[in-house]
Image (cartoon, rainbow, N blue to C red):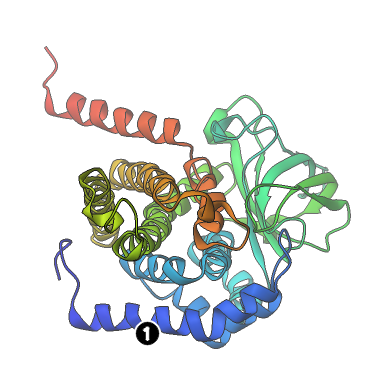
Amino acid sequence: MTVFSLEPAQLAWCAELRALAAERLCPLAEKGEPGHVNRPLVAELGRLGLLSRLFTSGALDLCLMRESLAYVCTEAETALALQGLGAHPVHAHGTEAQRARWLPRVSSGHAVAAFALSEPEAGSDAAALSLRAEPDGTGRWRLTGEKCWISNAPEADLYTVFARTTPGAGARGVTAFLVPADRPGLTGTPLDMLSPHPIGALDFDAVPVTADDVLGEPDRGFRVAMGTLNLFRPSVGAFAVGMARAALDATIAHTAQREAFDGKLRDLQTVAHQVAEMAMRTEAARLMVYAAATAYDSGAPDVPGRAAMAKLLATETAQYVVDAAVQLHGARALRRGHLLEHLYREVRAPRIYEGASEVQRAVIAKELYARHAEEVPSV
């Protein structure tokens, strides 16, 4: 397999995922309440074996799952992705006891996971987080502070929480903790957001954690966070590609049959050229996403830059394609319940979460200059 094409077995699997999404996931998604965890949908993802695949597959498989599900059912895609994002640190850095307790429940869809990194004053600048993990003198810590914009909060069953254990140490003073939702002092509030999936704020009032709750090593939690994001950033791009492809296909079908100006919309050169532009950008984004995922799976050294490029290009492309699709459909696309009205609400957030587009540009530039410094001998 190359990054430019998929094997027949992969193409068949993607087709199977789209069929499963249409037949078994969309009906459950339609019954869900916006802004709340759809537990029947999460459980069905578990029954289909898709959640367990999060922890046994590589980055490319993750991208194929997210792209295929997003094409048909964005709610199912997001539910799957949030399980992976919240529980991947447990899979990658957890102790045997942590993994044994939580991963089977997450994989079956009986426990909902969340990734709690962002704060009211530390979104894109994750190293500036201020949630405090204060030692209590008994070898334990107390978590005090806030988290905000946390997907699946406050309804998740477990949180991967990043807290400051060494004041003034920047990224080097952060520790990752696995915090069950029933810990005393942990409360949350839902936030009314544009995106239909649940997002909330968390308040930590001296929440107790111990060494048994640490993911990885103390003061090394930023590595846990960045390692997780390097895996999931290309797949955010895959989510965006799936939405772009859905919008593009809807536009091709609409302009091929819509009567206008004594012909079909597709007969207007300006429309045909617009559709061609949408298709070209979508394909370019898809290829970059696959390339970044393949680089991750092969252990390439330039994964952070590639992951940032993939997320940046794909999410910006999806915004452009969905917006163009709405324009070519006209007012009908703005009616509640229309596919494009749904995609228009869904497509905006990925340009912000897991590193805003501006942050991705900063990551790309940092990687480029670091590589330049390595290649140019000092004088």
Q: Is residue 136 left or right of residue 101?
A: right
Picture quadrant where residue 146 is located: top right
Residue 53 locus on image (x, y percent): 44, 77
Task: Pick whichever, 258 or 81, lies toward us.
Answer: 258
Q: Is residue 172 left or right of residue 246?
A: right
Q: Is residue 91 above or below residue 201?
A: below
Q: Is residue 48 left or right of residue 130?
A: left
Can see residue 144?
yes
Residue carrying label 1: 16
Q: Quadrant of the C terminus?
A: top left
Task: Pick whichever, 214 or 311, lies toward us.
Answer: 311
Q: Secondary structure at mark 1?
A: helix
Residue at 66% of width from left, 37% of height from top? 164
Q: Is residue 82 above or below residue 127?
A: below
Residue 265 locus on image (x, y percent): 30, 54
Q: How many numbered marks have been drawn onto this rendered protein structure?
A: 1
Task: Pick whichever, 251 or 214, lies toward us.
Answer: 251
Residue at 49% of width from left, 57% of height from top? 340
Residue at 70% of width from left, 33% of height from top? 120
Residue type beneath disc 1: Glu
Residue 243 locus on image (x, y percent): 42, 59
Residue 231 locus on image (x, y percent): 40, 56
Q: Is residue 60 left or right of residue 134?
A: left
Task: Pick whichever, 169 or 340, lies toward us.
Answer: 340
Residue at 18% of width from left, 61% of height from top? 3
Picture quadrant where residue 283 is located: bottom left
